[in-house]
Amino acid sequence: MMVVAALRVVTTNNVVHAALWLVAVLAGASGQYILLAAEFVAITQVLVYIGAVMVLFLFGTMLTRARIGFDSDLNNSYKRLGIPVAVVMMGAMGLALIRSFGDEKLPVSDNIVSTQRVSDQIFGPYLLPFWALSFVLLAAIIGAIVLARKD
Amino acid sequence: MFVNQFLFLAAVLFCIGVYGVVARKNAVLMLMSTELILNSVNINLLAFAMRNGSTDGHTFALYIIAVAAAEVGVGLGLVLLVYRNKKSISVDELSEMRG
């Protein structure tokens, strides 16, 4: 289902429809995170991606396209080239995955990774990347304001 | 649950995202394809975190989500600027830097 939605994101001819299919993909990814016992990441995914990033995308669409709706001029001339590139890449990755992991199973564990453990990681050994990330976000905010300001 | 079921899903999403970046002309749609790629990487990180029983992958996944949010903010600011100057966001028409 996620794969179908992702294919619709890259093949639909309507920008708003592409954004809404992307919501389906992101929600599916959130479900996968819960399957992988990562509840905090799943909740963050819903809040940040589906909440904030999609609103940004829809704003961007509406501010840049005068015409919302069907538009046949969304693909460039490399469209034919993209299909073999993606298929070859998929074949290579699939072969590598089958050879490396075969039918190895995930360990069955009933302990969900708690938010406390994640925060101990972030504010413990990974504190320096966290600071760097804070500066990245600050620079992004300032950069977006400077770019979008009318002067 | 197999390890490969998650890794294959991530690989498929990655390839679809690469196809989207190659084939799309609209800058906003290219950003959406980039989001697909980043999400596939997140699925991979969390699958390996569960396989190895560690929490490092969760931390990296959270950092990737934050960086992706910053990237979308700056990217859409750039797209708005380009649209204001050229009345179009087709990346094929951005050819001023061609030598």
Image: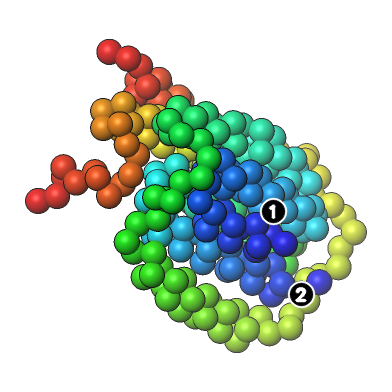
**Label 1: few (<14), some or many (≥20) within 10 Å?**
many
x, y (%) of residue A21?
63, 49
Disc 2 versus disc 1: nearer the observer = 1
Front in this rendered view, residue A83 or A67? A67
Quarter holding residue B36: bottom right
- Residue at disc 1, secondary structure: helix
What's the coloring here? rainbow
- Give the letter of the chain under mark 2: B
> At 68% from the left edge and 84% from the top edge, which residue is drawn?
A102
Q: Is residue A125 visible?
A: no
In-image side of A118 versus A13 (left or right): right
* Circle 1 residue: A29
**Image quarter (top left, top right, bottom left or bottom right) of the C terminus of chain A:** top left
User: Which residue is under mark 2?
Assistant: B2
User: Please, what is the three-letter code of the amino acid marked with disc 1?
Assistant: Ala
Would you say residue A22 is visible in this rendering?
Answer: yes
Q: Quadrant of residue A122?
A: top right
What x and y, as percent, mark residue B64? 55, 46
